[in-house]
Structures are given as structure tokens and as C-alpha cells.
Amino acid sequence: MQILLTNDDGIYAPGIAALKHQIQDIGQITVVAPDIEQSGVGHSITFSHPLRIREVHLNNEFIGYGVRGSPADCVKLAIYEIMKKNPDVVISGLNMGANVGIHILYSGTVAAAVEAAIMGYPSIAVSFEITEQYADVQEAAKVAKGVIENIIKHKLPRGSLLNVNIPSRPSNQIKGIKVTRQYARDFKETFDRRIDPGGKAYYWLMGTDKSIHHEEGTDISAVNEGYISITPLRYDLTDQSLYKKIEGWDWNI
Amino acid sequence: MQILLTNDDGIYAPGIAALKHQIQDIGQITVVAPDIEQSGVGHSITFSHPLRIREVHLNNEFIGYGVRGSPADCVKLAIYEIMKKNPDVVISGLNMGANVGIHILYSGTVAAAVEAAIMGYPSIAVSFEITEQYADVQEAAKVAKGVIENIIKHKLPRGSLLNVNIPSRPSNQIKGIKVTRQYARDFKETFDRRIDPGGKAYYWLMGTDKSIHHEEGTDISAVNEGYISITPLRYDLTDQSLYKKIEGWDWNI
């Protein structure tokens, strides 16, 4: 089985190393990942400058291919230029931090999996909620392995994408797995306005306390309650109900 | 009427200036846009460095606020920090180049409108297909104005987003308006591999010839045929049909 493994935290990130270690016996793994962190880049692609592929070694061991580009770039380059055989599954992660709710739209981890799905491959984005209380990435990667094996066993269809989020707790305290929908409301993330030494204003985007959000059946609520959340995602953004509404408008302008 | 106007081509781009000129009598326009081009950034957001807001003047005239960030950042900053009143509508464009099919996912223009929709505002992304044959942005902005006025007249609901694409032809040759769905197939964009003077490989992402793609009822076919395409978009990416399928899988791992 051919597995393409990527992420948005970068090829040296602990999450991708931990996940690679865990899933190495599932198949032949090719790592193609950004050579610097790309968190929050969303589904960006690079066309204003060329991309390069660099063989990356760590402790004298070849670990994969680094790309100075976005996670979506990595998937395209991996499949068109690097891998000799097409992947049977594309896995993006293990991301350090949950990708739930509208953060799915900002996430490079998810974007890589979306890109793979567009190209027709089954794909899985895997993220791990990090908190001050718990951040054992090795154990989270073990949990991720179990979920990934189950998904592979059930034969995820071509072009399908599952967004997996693992809650921030030891595996023996995880309550189970819930298939969820995306929490599709504003997190109301605002800015912290500060003044620099020169007297000018600058603005930090403030993260939200995700635990305040709750809606039964959603990804965020499942993770908040201690479940692994699995949300099937699509890349056709057409809003069918709005379509029906505006179809009836007078468009003779 | 309060209008927030943004884009991804940057605050000095001809498209945003042309559109601002055309719609200035519709309402009070606040321009908040990236101070450098951000095409292809997708729905990226900035949290690894702080943002600054700069008052931008052109030919001794104040034209708006420039932000060294993504289009989505601009929308957040505009609404939380810059505008005294909330916008009645958020408009992103006029983008130089169509945003149809899966390019919707890569587009900063669309991401700005998505961000506004998440925040609860009606929003419109407007893009103009540029070709070698035709690229009159002033005339395209006039066409855009007509479409925008019609959308405003019909009262687009809160949190709704319409993605408008104007075909590359003089307005008297535009065949009309079609409400469409997103063309949701791979454009199969590959890479051009070149060798630098030092003998090392580099890769340019190759754009697709969009005219080869056709599927009745989609955004890309409408634009290819000379219609203005209007696609309602959503930001809840949950795939309901895949949801039903995987819900029945055995998740006791």
C-alpha cells in the first residue's frame, strides 16, 4: 500500500514523525511536507514563484522531501513529480492543534487532504487537540493509527476526505469515536491591539476558547466531550438551498 | 448603506479601483485590502505575526486601508477594528482572473467573502476572466455594478455568499446571467520542471486551459459560453452523503 504523508507544521514537526513511526507497517510511506511551518495558510497554492524539492535527512536518516511551499503544493508535487506509484491513501498530520469548525477553512492540514481528494485520492486529515493539560503526541499518534487502520479497512471511496480530530487526553480516557458535522458558526475571533515602542498600533489575532462552543453532533462538541471526531468533508462549495432561492430572482439586468 | 470593499490583488490593483469608482453611489465604501498582492493565498489567516493597518493615499487622495496580511485578515480587521458601523454588504473584487471550479478554494478573493459570510454578513465575490483577447477592467466593473445592484435589490440573506464571474468579452456580447453550481472536478494542473543555472531542478505550477472543461450548469461552462456566472457558496464543508455512508461503519476500534 502506497501512503503519501504530509502536514502543515513542517517536515521537522514532531507530529508527522510520530505518525510516520506509528503507521510504518501499514504501507510504503512517502513524506512530502513543507520545509517550514505553514499553519493557517488555508488552501494556498504557489504560482508566483517556482517550487523546489529538497531531500531531507535527520540524524543521518532520509526522512522525506521538503518543499518551500504550502501543504497543497506538497500534495501536487508529490503525486505529479515525486512518487513513482500513485498513493492509495493520502494522510495529512498529525497536526498539533485541533482543526474543527471554521478552522477547517484556515487549516493547511485539511487543505492538503482536500487537494488530494480533488485529485481523486482517498484522504485523511488528522489533528490532535493540544492543551496545557495534555500534549503527548506519541500517544495521540498511536490513537491516530487505530483510526486510520479502521478507515483503510472500510475502503474510503475515491476522492473522499475524512477530517479526524483527537481530543487532548490520554487514550484510556477517550470516550470513543463520533461521526460529526462541521460546527459552522463564527468563533468570533477578535484582535488584541497593542502599541509598539515607536507609538504605532499593531494587532494580534486572538484565538478563541473553543470549549465555549457547543452544538450537539458537531466536531467541536465531540472533541470537547472527549470523543474522537470524524467529519466527512467535501470540496464542492455550492450552497444548494441558496441556489434554489436565488434561481427565482429576476436576473434580467 | 455601508459597503466593505476588499480584494486579493492588493489595494493598488486596477480591479478594486474600477469597482470602487462604479459602485460609489450605492453606499458608503470602506476599502480594506492587502497592501501587496495575495492571489492564491486561499483562506489563510495570520497569527504568527501581528498585523498593521496603514492609511493608503494615491495621487494625494485617501483610498483606503492597507493590511500586510491575507484577504480574510482584511475582513476581520475591517469589521472589528476599522469600520465604525457594521457593513450591510461585503464585496471582494474585482479580481483579475476568473475564480471558478476548484480555483474557488485557492482564491483569496473568495476567501474574503467566505470570511464575511461566516461573520454573518451578506457577501459577494466578483471576478473578471482576463484573456489575451479582452481585458477591459473598467467595462467589467460596470457590468459588476449591475449585478451587485440586482443582488442588493433582492436582499441577499445574512451570511450568504455569491461568487460572481464575468466572462472575458465586451458587455454587449455577454449573453446574460446564469445561476450555476461549482465545477467540482480536478483541473489536472501539473508542473513545468526546469533546471536553474546551478543545475538544480525547480517547478512552476502550470495553469490549466479552463476552456477545455465543460459540464452543463457549472460556473466554468457558463463563463466559457459567455454568461455571467453566479454561484451560491457555503462554508459548511460537511459532506452529508459521505456522512450517511461512514456513519454505518464499525467505529469500535
Image (cartoon, coloured by chain):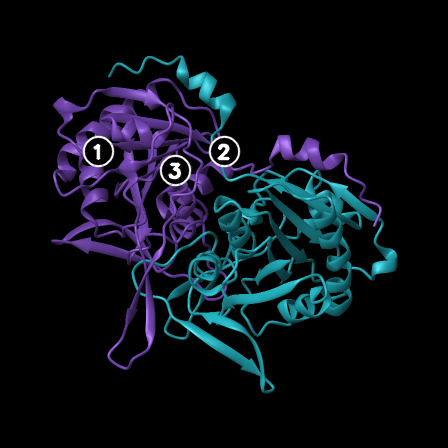
Chain colours: A cyan, B purple
Whether discs 1 and 3 lie on one chain: the answer is yes
Residue B245 placed where, x, y %? 69, 33
Q: Which mark is residue A91?
A: none
Identified by mark 3, the residue type is: Gly
Towards the viewer: B82 or B162: B162
Nearer to us: label 1 or label 3: 3
Q: Earlier in the sequence, mark 1 or mark 3?
A: 1
Identified by mark 2, the residue type is: Arg
- Determine whether, in the image, residue B227 is placed left or right of residue A154: left
Identified by mark 1, the residue type is: Gln
Towards the viewer: A71 or A56: A56
Residue A200 placed where, x, y %? 37, 67
**Would you identify the image quadrant in which residue A15 lies?**
bottom right
Which residue is at 67% across, 34% downward?
Answer: B243
Residue at the spot of label 1: B24
Residue at the spot of label 2: B234
